[in-house]
Image (cartoon, rainbow, N blue to C red):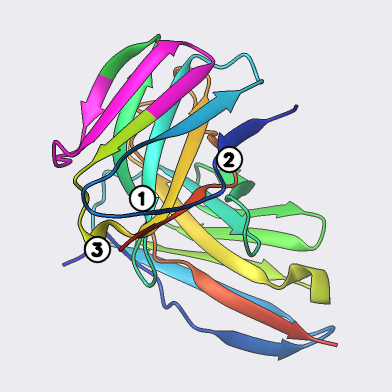
Amino acid sequence: QKEVEQDPGPLSVPEGAIVSLNCTYSNSAFQYFMWYRQYSRKGPELLMYTYSSGNKEDGRFTAQVDKSSKYISLFIRDSQPSDSATYLCALSAEVGNNRLAFGKGNQVVVIP
Amino acid sequence: ETGVTQTPRHLVMGMTNKKSLKCEQHLGHNAMYWYKQSAKKPLELMFVYSLEERVENNSVPSRFSPECPNSSHLFLHLHTLQPEDSALYLCASSQRGSDEQYFGPGTRLTVT
């Protein structure tokens, strides 16, 4: 079983829709959860970082963690064409141990 | 230059060639990473350097040889590569003890 499962998509949504992305994981040792956004021909950039179950909001983005179900989600409200990118989840078992487990990435296309 | 830079951005090499990838970070970080990104696969951590000392070698074949002469520079020396080594090679940096990694734009490598 893979450490982190993420459906690669692609996911196409109309502008203004809510985008819902998720990852599941098998290792209960993961305690820190990140979402990266990667535009075409660019490197990933950190979007959200959380370490507790529950929701964390940052503007139009909400990261949700359910440790009991080993399930994390990213929601994008009022999606814009500029949100078209690949979104990768990344998990860490110990802060700063330099070892992040990444999902495959989920390609999102927001259609104007 | 700001952030993390990588050169070259694109590289085509034959299986008998020797080439090097260069990464430079302008963020004052003291940990640097090499990742391999292939289509439909999670990011694969290759090497980690912390305070210029290699702390992780993720079972990478010896045809990949990293070098970290100082905390701002990281190289990946390549020789006798295989076609399956074609991928996007990403460099990242962070503060030691932090999960927040900052990525460069990557080098798109094609082995013919």
Is there one chain holding both mark 2 and mark 3?
Answer: yes
In this rendering, does residue A94 appear at all? no
Pointer 1 chain: B
Q: Is residue A106 magenta?
A: no
Comparing B78 with A1, the one in front is B78
Task: Tell me if residue B9 comes above or below residue B102 in the rendering.
Answer: below
State how far apart marks 2 and 3 are (Cα).
Answer: 23 Å
Residue under the point 22% across and 50% down: B81
As drawn, is B87 to the left or to the right of B107? left
Task: Tell me if residue A60 comes above or below residue A95 in the rendering.
Answer: below
Disc 1 designates what residue? Answer: B36
Comparing B46 with B15, the one in front is B15
Residue under the point 32% across and 43% down: B45
Looking at the image, is mark 3 or mark 1 nearer the viewer?
Answer: 3
The amino acid on which the numbered mark 3 sits, given as a three-letter code, is Pro
Pointer 2 chain: B
User: On residue B24, which mark appears?
Assistant: none
The picture quadrant where one finds residue B54 is top left
Badge 2 marks a residue whose secondary structure is loop
Disc 3 designates what residue? Answer: B83
Q: Is the C-beta separation of discs 1 and 2 under 8 Å?
A: no
State how far apart marks 1 and 2 are (Cα).
Answer: 12 Å
Badge 3 marks a residue whose secondary structure is helix
Disc 2 designates what residue? Answer: B104
> Which of disc 3 and disc 2 is earlier in sequence?
3
Label 2 neighbour load within 10 Å: few <14, some 14-19, many 20+: many
The amino acid on which the numbered mark 1 sits, given as a three-letter code, is Lys
